Amino acid sequence: MDGVKEGFLVNPFVVDARTEITTRLLSEKGYSVLTMGDSGEDVEETYVHKDFERKFFSETTNRTFCQTFLKNALTDPISGEIGKTIIFCVSQNHAAKITQFLNEYADQLFPGKYNSDFAIQVTSRITDSQQFSINFSNNKLSGFCNFIPEYKTGKTRVCVTVGMMTTGYDRPADLLKRDH
């Protein structure tokens, strides 16, 4: 079953969230930085796009990604919440930081609504991650967050993953149904 054709999934859309670092990483020259070598001399290290989050971490860039996502994310047509989303990261540590940043920003945007359950890391190192995947697909990860009493929707809006949850979910998210 084609989840996009059937209306259960949506194709991703691209939003420009480049920073100076990502622009340079994607260039032919790469992103170069000076570091101090073992004997105190300056050593130039150059990174390319595949090195991001594998060989170095840019908090500013990752925060920009998270802020851009929250600003441009599709929303639930009934509750107005950020729509259920899967974010793919390149490492366990990257997933942990993205989850942390998203929860920080969600707490600022929606004070007291999610209590660090807005985004959850669902990776192989997390206990019960398979059950988290199932609960997310069934729209009940972290219980329910009822912004509208008659409308039940899962509290967790974003799963942050590395290599899991890659096939999508060909099942309707209860976005357009009201529980009566």
Image (tube, rainbow, N blue to C red):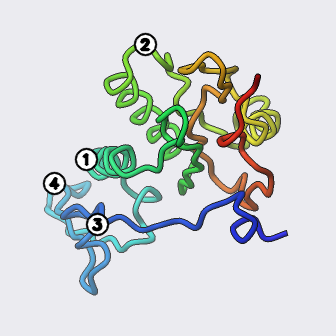
Which kind of residue does numbered mark 1 sit on?
Thr
Q: Which residue is mark 1?
A: 60
Q: Give left or right: position of 4 versus 86.
A: right
Q: What is the crowding at mark 2: few (fewer than 14 residues within 10 Å), some, or many (at least 20)?
A: few
Disc nearer the start of the sequence (3/1):
3
Q: Which residue is mark 3?
A: 22
Mark 4 secondary-structure assignment: loop
Q: Which residue is mark 4?
A: 40
Q: Determine the CA span between mark 2 and mark 1.
A: 25 Å
Q: Determine the CA span between mark 3 and mark 1.
A: 11 Å
Q: Give left or right: position of 56 versus 34.
A: right
Q: Give left or right: position of 175 versus 116.
A: right
Q: Residue furthest bottom?
A: 28
Mark 3 secondary-structure assignment: helix
Cβ atoms at labels 3 and 4 below 8 Å apart: no
Which kind of residue does numbered mark 4 sit on?
Gly
The residue sitting at 70% across, 62% down in the picture is 7
Closer to us: 21 or 77: 77
Q: Which residue is mark 2?
A: 112
Mark toward the viewer: 2 or 4: 2
Disc nearer the start of the sequence (3/4):
3
